[in-house]
Amino acid sequence: MVAERGELTELRIWEELGRISDPEIPAISLVDLGVIGSVSVDSERARVELLPTFVGCPAIEVMRSEVVERIGQLGLSSRVEVDITFDPPWTSERITPAGREQLRRSGFAPPHLGPSVPSEAAGLDELAILPIAECPYCGSRNTALENPFGPTLCRAIYHCADCRQPFEQMKRV
Amino acid sequence: MTGAPPTLDAATRTALAGLLLSVADDEFVIGFWDSEWTGIAPMLEEDVATSSIAQDEIGHARALYELLADLTGADADAIAFGRDADAFRHAALLNHARGDWAFSVARRYLYETADAVRLEVLARSTHEPLALLAGKMRREETYHLLHANAWLRRLADGAPEGRERLVTSIRTLWPEAHAVFAPVSGEDTLLSSGILPEPLAAQRGAWEGQVRPMLEPIAGSLPEIALDPAGRERRTDDFRWLHGEFTMVSASEEGAVW
């Protein structure tokens, strides 16, 4: 295969990563979820940095093997490497505006914007500190937190008092 | 998880390994105790919550065991599942079986508040992989802290029986909670290199300053505790039982992978 300029290869990798779905929420891509830290290419290797949403996220190995496979199929001359790193840490603010809309359309309230919940929270009440989530189905703000812990590490459970739907929110971290 | 381990002299490496092991074992063991509530918590929401918290803690333990493995050339799974019960170095607070719900709430509150103090310090470590991991863990642990605090208030302000059980548990666990800050071997080396930016004794003081004003109105005056230097070394039959549970698969199927 003809050697490509590194920048062009990086662009092709980003495009392909944009077509790989999150294993737990397939409506959103890895790029829109913000878990791709960086892409770099030299003559020997194409390196992708993955940022786990949560340290214990069991989907991270699924993401890693999916990235290796899909980027491997691009037929690049360099070997594909995926590194998992906390530098920078993934935060919910890394989700792109398009990603927030994709979440909403698949029934997930996007995470609250703004700074992360403070860690010095020993005396605080979870209901006071976690702001209202907007119902992804009807847009109502008349909702209540049912459980800050949900079916996966990154999701909380709410209930909408107007359309009477339970829904999930991707947590702010 | 990424990059080569920084060059550390042998004494620093050994001391850091001891520190990482103590934090990792704490997270691992409390995670397994939490998982004992899966399916039998007092309400469905708490089934989900304790299971999710357990998954977080065991995930944190895994990441810490991997840092340790990078440092010593060992295998993370072998550290987690290949050791005898007596080789674990978690704090004495985590030696007890899960007990009743009030006992678990009291222990979670004591542990989460201590862990928050510790993580704030470790996030400033000069050992970059540890600082990055601790910084990331803090964001997640905030939810645990809120949860522990909400349940402490719920039981303290609720019916007399729940409050009574909570008070008994707080008073039982109080002395052993201090063992989260029990000395680790080589602490001076870790302090001088900035790997541990604050002495464990100072961390203990900061923690007590935070929790006494929360706990004493509920449980009455709590005694001053003389720190037990062996607070991370004694193991109990409760823990031996748990160890048998979490090593069952690796013991019956050598080299089993997830």
Image (cartoon, rainbow, N blue to C red):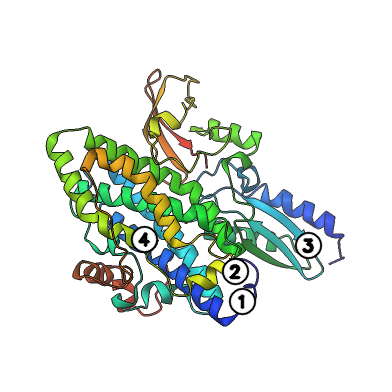
Looking at the rendered structure, whether the residues under marks 4 and 3 are on a common chain is answered as no
Residue A98 against residue B166 in the figure, above or below: above
Judged by depth in the image, the label closer to the viewer, 2 or 4, is 2
- Mark 1 nearby-residue class (10 Å; few <14, some 14–19, many ≥20): few
Q: What chain does mark 3 sit on? A: A
Q: Secondary structure at mark 4?
A: helix
Q: What chain does mark 2 sit on? A: B
Query: In the shown orientation, is residue A41 left or right of residue A142?
Result: right
Q: In this rendering, does residue B68 appear at all?
A: no
Q: Which residue is mark 2?
A: B193
Q: Earlier in the sequence, mark 2 or mark 4?
A: 4
> Residue B48 appears at what percent x and percent y?
32, 45
Q: What chain does mark 4 sit on? A: B
Q: Residue at x 32, y 37 (%)?
A: B150
| A152 vs B135, nearest the viewer | B135
Q: Earlier in the sequence, mark 2 or mark 1?
A: 1
Q: Which residue is mark 1?
A: B8
Q: Amino acid at mark 3?
A: Val
Looking at the rendered structure, whether the residues under marks 1 and 3 are on a common chain is answered as no
Residue B80 against residue A105 in the figure, above or below: below
Q: Amino acid at mark 4?
A: Val
Cα–Cα gap, marks 3 and 2: 35 Å
What label sits on residue B180 in the rendered view?
Answer: 4
CB atoms of marks 4 and 3 within 8 Å: no
